[in-house]
Structure formats: C-alpha cells, structure tokens
C-alpha cells in the first residue's frame, strides 16, 4: 500500500529518495536520544553508587543478624549500645536526581545569584567610595576658597600698607 502512494506521486524516484533520507535521519536522531538517555541513567547510577553500596551492605548485615542465636544477639560484644545514624548532607531539593543538564543549570543559577550579590556589594562599596570622595572634594574646595580669601585679605592689607608707606614718604 505504501508503494502505491509513492507511485501515485508526481516524481516516484524523488519521493523514494526523500523517504530513504528521512528514515536515515530519524534513525540517527533516535540513536542519539537513546545514547543521551543511557548516559543520563549512567550518571544517576554513578552519583548514587556509594549510597546503594551502603544500603546493600546494611541489607547483608541484617540478613546475617537474623541467622544469629538469641544469646549472640543479646551480647554486648556483638551489639554495642550505641547507634550511628547517617543523615544526607544535601538539601531536600538536591536529593532527587534531575539529570545532568538540570544539575548544571542549577549550579549556573547558584553561581549567577552569587555573582549578582557580589556585584550588588561592589556597587554599594563604590557608592560609599564616591560619597567619601565627593565629601573630600567639597572639603578641599572649601579650604581652597578660604585660603584664596585669606590671600585677597593679605593682598589688600599689603596695598594699604604700601599706600600708607608711600604717603608718609611723600609727606
């Protein structure tokens, strides 16, 4: 039936060629998808391998303990009175596997947040520095104006003194 549809087209050879090329590329895309899924599953297993190992070890220990006699189970030598509890150190949202890409995106997001916080702090530091610099500039301008005023006053005094000396010499 499919061959009839190819024959019914205006160009049988072109239709057949396009069909073959399309099927070839679909197979390549599907293989890439399969490889990506398998890689993601492998990464997930590798990330949880230590936890799985410890879990399997605990199951074996429990199985061995179930075969012991009651006297051996109650022995302080075999079973001390303390217990060790392991708690995951990850935050609850980081415990579930989300895949490699999501893990990278989450890491990038955390880095971007950290960078924006650092930029905000640098901006605040820059504003404080600018304010200090502007205050210092104002203070220096005031000192300069004061010294110019003093210089003008001293110049006026010198003129008056010279005029007084000149008038005494003329008289």
Image: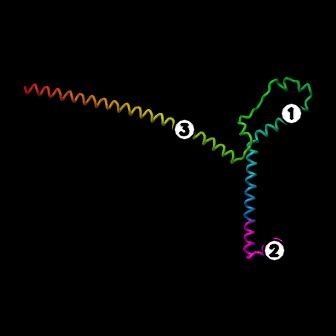
Marks 3 and 2, how far apart at CA: 69 Å
For marks 1 and 3, give the one nearer the viewer: 3
On screen, residue 125 above or below 171: below
Q: Quadrant of the C terminus?
A: top left
The picture quadrant where one finds residue 15 is bottom right
Q: CA distance from mark 2 to mark 1?
A: 67 Å
Residue at 81 percent across and 74 percent down: it is 4
Q: Which residue is mark 1?
A: 62
**Residue 4: numbered disc:** 2
Disc 3 to disc 2: CB gap under 8 Å: no
> Image height check: is 45 above or below 22?
above
Front residue of this view, candidates 56 and 134: 134
Q: Earlier in the sequence, mark 2 or mark 1?
A: 2
- Sooner in the amino-acid sequence: mark 3 or mark 2: 2
Q: CA distance from mark 1 to mark 3?
A: 54 Å
Q: Residue furthest right?
A: 69
The magenta-colored residue range is 1-22
**Which residue: 40% across, 32% down?**
136
Query: Of discs 2 and 1, which sits in the foreground?
Result: 2
């Amino acid at each position: 039936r499919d061959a009839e549809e190819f024959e019914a087209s205006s160009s049988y050879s072109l239709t057949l060629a396009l069909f073959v090329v399309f099927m070839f590329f679909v197979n390549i895309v599907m293989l890439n998808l399969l490889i990506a899924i398998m890689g993601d599953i492998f990464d997930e297993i590798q990330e949880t391998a230590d936890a799985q190992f410890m879990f399997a070890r605990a199951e074996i220990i429990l199985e061995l303990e179930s075969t012991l006699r009651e006297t051996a189970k109650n022995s302080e030598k075999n079973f001390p009175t303390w217990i060790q509890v392991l708690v995951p150190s990850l935050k609850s949202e980081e415990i579930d596997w989300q895949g490699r890409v999501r893990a990278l995106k989450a890491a990038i997001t955390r880095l971007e947040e950290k960078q924006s916080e650092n930029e905000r702090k640098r901006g605040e530091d820059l504003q404080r520095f600018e304010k200090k610099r502007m205050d210092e500039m104002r203070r220096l301008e005031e000192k300069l104006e004061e010294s110019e005023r003093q210089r003008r006053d001293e110049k006026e005094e010198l003129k008056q003194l010279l005029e007084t000396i000149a008038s005494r010499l003329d008289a």
